[in-house]
Image (cartoon, grey):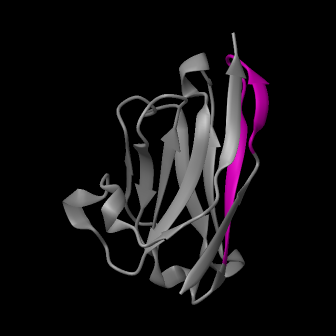
Amino acid sequence: QVQLVESGGGLVQAGGSLRLSCAASGRTFSSYFVGWFRQAPGKEREFVAAITMRGGITVYADSVKGRFTISRDNAKNTGYLQMNSLKPEDTAVYYCAADLVNPGYRYYTESKYDYWGQGTQVTVSS
């Protein structure tokens, strides 16, 4: 099993950038498919981005495509979400999630991920 801890959130002005980190401990990080989700106040949690075990394939929600980049460094047991050109509507708690099984085309489905971090708050001011 793996434990996930997110960091890097904060307050930023619109147009700014943040890089979120997801530090993993426990079982070998490279064994896990990793996703990022977010939950804005009063809204359901939604998919943001995902990356395969070796980082060869990445997928994004349409709302962040071209602005966010997901990556991972398996040697450091850490995943990343680089967020550029941030908008007020990106304000949310961001969660890192992982699973031993590649969810295939269901990568956007929360139930496909067994392990979750506690979340980190991102606030984008206008």
Q: Is residue 11 magenta?
A: yes
Indicate left or right for 77 with 57 as reference: right
Residue shown at the point (37%, 39%) measured from the top left: 61
Tell me if residue 84 comes above or below residue 106 in the rendering: above
Tell me if residue 25 comes above or below residue 50 in the rendering: below
Residue nearest the viewer, comparing 116 with 107: 116
Quarter location, residue 85: top right
Tell me if residue 108 comes above or below residue 61 in the rendering: below
The quadrant in which the C terminus is found is top right
Percent coordinates x, y for residue 95 in the rendering: 56, 53
Looking at the image, the residue that sits furthest to the left is 105
Percent coordinates x, y for residue 45 in the rendering: 43, 42
Looking at the image, the residue that sits furthest to the front is 42
Percent coordinates x, y for residue 57 in the rendering: 37, 61
Indicate left or right for 84 with 113 as reference: right
Tell me if residue 40 comes above or below residue 46 in the rendering: above
Quarter location, residue 90: top right
Indicate left or right for 47 with 96 as reference: left
Question: How many numbered badges does the structure rendering display?
Answer: 0
Span colored in magenta: 9-24
Percent coordinates x, y for residue 21 in the rendering: 69, 57
Q: Is residue 94 magenta?
A: no
Residue shown at the point (50%, 63%) measured from the top left: 97
Residue shown at the point (62%, 24%) measured from the top left: 86
Most common SS among magenta residues: strand
Residue shown at the point (42%, 73%) measured from the top left: 114
